[in-house]
Image: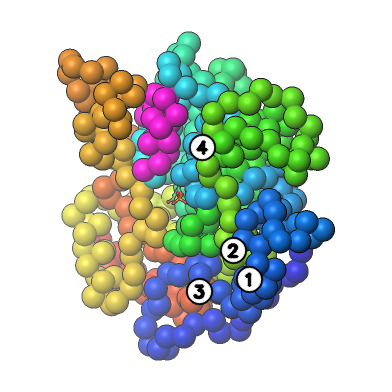
Amino acid sequence: MNAFVMPANPRPVSDRTVPAPVLGWALIGREEEELVLEVLRRKALFRYYGPDPASPPPMVSTLERELATMIGTRFALGVTSGSAALEVALGALGVGPGDEVILPAWSWVSCFTAIVRVGGKPVLAEVDRSLCLAPGEITRLRTARTKAALVVHFQGVAADLDALVAEARQAGIALLEDCAESPGASYRGRRVGSFGDIAIFSFQQQKTITSGEGGAVVTNDPRLYERAVRMHDLGQYRDFHARQKPAAEPAFCGSQFRMAELTGAVALAQLRKVDAVRAHCRRLSLRLRAQLADLPGLQARHIPDPEGESGFETYYWVASTEQRDVYRARLKDAKIPCEQMTGTYAQYRRAYVETGLAHAPGATPFPVGGVWPAQGYRAEDFPRTEDLIHRFIVIPVGVWHREDDMDTIAAVIRRTHDELNPK
Ligand SMILES: Cc1ncc(COP(=O)(O)O)c(C=O)c1O
């Protein structure tokens, strides 16, 4: 793998403005251009074959090899998006009608919808002060129908994996890690994505590294790998994969979520930059947090393994929603971005949960008729999550930020803290 060195000053904006918190796309340059041009010159845009049978297209396969090496799994599979990766992983695990999957109530849209798309029933769980699935929830919510738990490593921070892995093992269910927002993050020295039975990544534009759209599935389990390949390629299992793991599973009806070579080229160049992005953001976030550590009115996010986090977003809880609004207003007045980088929602407030519908009446896992939203799908069923999600402030950090931006942001937060907590 080629080492990428962060440019001394990747920032194109005015020195006096705290920049937007941009990530991988802002580092698109010569490395991406060269690989994309290579694909075009070969005229081989499809990952499995091109005009020259003697020279198979290399981009997606190289991305898979380098991703598996980085994460520390036996297998990786490129797919069309993180949402597709979730459906592929759930399909590989055999989740279908009658099966339940536990997931954090505070998560991205497709964490919920992918489960419904494969016919399973999403079961919402509380998050804790890490903003990831709370330990204890798998045990509390597990039933005889539970097939898997979906753990989201929310914005660069690994969830409390010691506890969650132990609970899933104890419950006898599979663990699916959603690393869409945390590529490169680690937990106790191991990369996220290598702890569960299977894991997914996203390369959408807003993510740490990007190919516009794109995603990947990783696993150590040969059976899950074969099933994931079949799920993403219309049930087929081509020679390329059979050379890595001989076919042993029956064919079944899959979807078509194959990654294209152009996507693979950009994702590969970006993958080689992920650690540089992470190191930059982490260094700056630590500087910001050090300057705010003595303020009693700010409660920091719990980070189960502080050594392994990425530092893309720093969270503080303040006393009330009203105080949060004052902090946000002061930050905005100072032209400091203070929005979350990735949309994350309380699933029970989304329209698809409020209706409980799937694409056809018979496809919803929820009872048709009767009271809806039922218990487990209403805001009042999630007191811990509700207490957390309306009173935090967030400081996103990206590759255009520098040390002096952290000092500017810290000064505004400190001033606001003193205004709200007079001595
Ligand atoms: C936690 C999480 N999972 C899955 C996805 C889906 O990824 P994509 O947008 O590539 O479909 C996202 C994207 O926002 C995400 O944040």
241 or 131, which is in the foreground?
241
Q: Residues within 10 Å of mark 1 (few under 14, many from 20)?
A: few
Task: For mark 3, give the secondary structure.
Answer: helix
Q: With 223 as the anchor, is 115 left or right in this view?
A: left
Please state which amino acid type lies under the numbered disc 4.
Ser
Could you tell me if the residues under marks 1 and 2 are in contact, i.e. CB atoms within 8 Å?
yes
Q: Which residues are magenta?
A: 109-124
Could you tell me if the residues under marks 3 and 2 are in contact, i.e. CB atoms within 8 Å?
no
**Does the beta carbon of the residue at mark 4 sit less than 8 Å from ligand 1?**
no
Q: CA distance from mark 4 to mark 2?
A: 20 Å
Please state which amino acid type lies under the numbered disc 2.
Leu
Please state which amino acid type lies under the numbered disc 1.
Leu
Q: CA distance from mark 1 to mark 4?
A: 27 Å
Task: For mark 2, give the secondary structure.
Answer: helix
Please name the residue that numbered disc 1 is placed on: 40
First in sequence: mark 1 or mark 3?
Answer: 3
Tell me: residue 214, above or below residue 119. Answer: below
Which of discs 1 and 2 lies nearer the camera? The answer is 1
Q: CA distance from mark 1 to mark 2?
A: 8 Å
Please name the residue that numbered disc 3 is placed on: 26
Which residue is rendered at x = 53% and y = 54% of the image? 214
